[in-house]
Image (cartoon, helix red, strand yellow):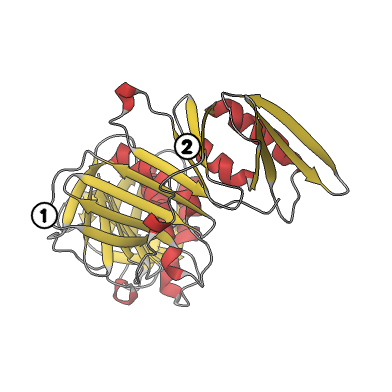
Amino acid sequence: MKVTCSKSELVKGVQIVQTAITGKGGLPILSNILIESDDSSPNRLKLVSTDLEVGIKCTIAADVAKKGAVTLPAKKFGDIVRELPDKDIKIEVSKDNKVIISCDKIIFKVVGLPKDEFPILPEFKHENKFTIKQALLKDIIKKTIFAISTDETRYVLNGLYLQTSNNKIEVVSTDGRRLAYILGGALPKSGKKTDIIIPAKAINELNRILTREGDVTVSFSENQISFELDNILLLSRLIEGRFPNYEQVIPKSSAVKLKINTQELLDAVKRISLLAPEKAESIKLALSDNKMMISATSQGVGEAEEEVVLSYKGDNFEVAYNPRYIGDVLKNIETEAVMLEFTDASSPAVIKPELKEKEKDKDNYLCVIMPMRL
């Protein structure tokens, strides 16, 4: 193989595929990037990486003088191309997989491995698919990714649960202590209903490569999913199993409903959480006439409190929550005010944007947070 491409194109391509490599697969070849001329496009170079769970393929512009393929250690190859001058880079591969990487007067000689040992990424027939705006999908991920469970014993919670029906997309995540839910529109109608769980690693990789422009095509089979955008293809296994009945967790009614400025509440929670106990991180919200007192006490360290003015009339009410859970939601709410709904001190609270009449067509977004002991 003999190809020439610009440094900027090569660095961009390597950055896109390199993060899929974990180095924990046990097989040395999984630490490599596959570099191959693209038969379907004569002026493109294909870069591929995989850890057998997630795979990424990216094509970049290149002058292909001789077709071929080789795999190179991802970290070493990435380090080399990043340190080269901002000029064209030539890659030449001999029959024994010796690779010469040259730029200006600089020459690197690296030993590669043959393509034959590299896992083949699955291909999709694209029978089950839908198209969605990249910006919409990126917003959906941003508003739900923080609630994905990291507890590997509850495997079905280690990803985003996604459903599509007609022109709606519904996404849920939960770690058992909080739940994020969003129902969005603007999907073209598709014949098959989607009901899948996408692993957290694939979601993180997807979030990294999504932009605010263009569309992404989502294709899926019984146990795999692919995301195709621009010159990038991301593939992943799906999580097998049944996602819990999340609708039972979302309270159908509440005893207390109040509106509060989003930024004021976020700032207050950040400040008071500085003195929240480290082991059982919690802050207390105490409601009385037209005010909320936010406080925290850390034994042996100190205490803090802050009063937030709001419109509230009713019985005095106290409840405690993990401040990080509240902050994660508030950071993703774009409306000026937020709605808080409580039932009692032992029941979950609901946090959602306060939508004005002209905003009613926006995404239906909410988060449910379990309380902590006072």
Picture quadrant of residue 304? top right
- Name the element at disc 2: loop
- Front-lying residue, 310 or 163: 310
- Name the element at disc 1: loop
Picture quadrant of residue 68? bottom left
Quarter of the image that includes the N terminus: bottom left
Asked whether residue 202 is in view, the answer is no
Q: Position of residue 182 (x, y in %)?
A: 36, 45
Task: Name the residue tied to disc 1.
Answer: 191
Task: Name the residue tied to disc 2.
Answer: 332
The amino acid pointed to by label 2 is: Asn
Of all residues, the one furthest to the front in this rendering is: 315
Residue in the picture at 75% in, 33% down:
305
The amino acid pointed to by label 1 is: Gly
Q: Is residue 55 above or below residue 62?
A: below
Asked whether residue 139 is in view, the answer is yes
Q: Is residue 127 above or below residue 134?
A: below
Q: Position of residue 122 (x, y in %)?
A: 24, 68
Of all residues, the one furthest to the right in this rendering is: 300
- Front-lying residue, 87 or 193: 193
